[in-house]
Image: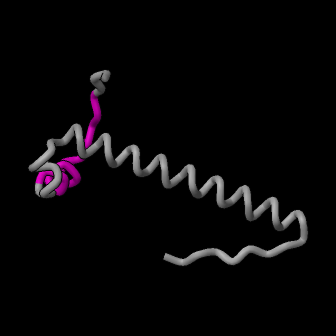
Amino acid sequence: MKTVQVMLDEELLAEMDADEEVKREGRSAFLRRSARELLRQRRRERIADAYRRGYADAGCRLRTRRR
């Protein structure tokens, strides 16, 4: 692993430090998991968009799932 420096505003840091996961696992673990989850979510969204565009080009309509 590499060490990186991250600047956070005081409100966000206070909110993060109040979180149970941060208290249990630490800031670094929390930030790693959060970044990983965000990147996975964005990847899923890009793939879903590509499917929608692909099927739209073929004259089909896909229903989107609401969460």
Examine the rendered structure and indicate whether residue 66 appears above or below residue 32. below
Q: Does the magenta stretch include residue 9?
A: yes
Specify the principal SS of the magenta part: helix
**Residue 25 placed where, x, y %?**
15, 44
Residue at (81, 59) in percent of width and height: 54
Range of magenta residues: 5-17
The quadrant the N terminus occupies is top left
Q: In this view, does 57 lie to the left or right of 25?
A: right
Examine the rendered structure and indicate whether residue 56 appears above or below residue 14. below
Q: Does the magenta stretch include residue 45?
A: no
Q: Nearer the viewer, residue 18 or 49?
A: 49
Examine the rendered structure and indicate whether residue 57 appears above or below residue 5. below
Instruction: Specify the farthest residue to the top.
Output: 2
**Residue 65 placed where, x, y %?**
58, 75
Residue at (88, 63) in percent of width and height: 57
Q: Which of 2 and 55 is in front in this view?
A: 55
Q: In which quarter of the image is residue 44?
A: bottom right
**Residue 56 placed where, x, y %?**
83, 67
Residue at (90, 65) in percent of width and height: 58
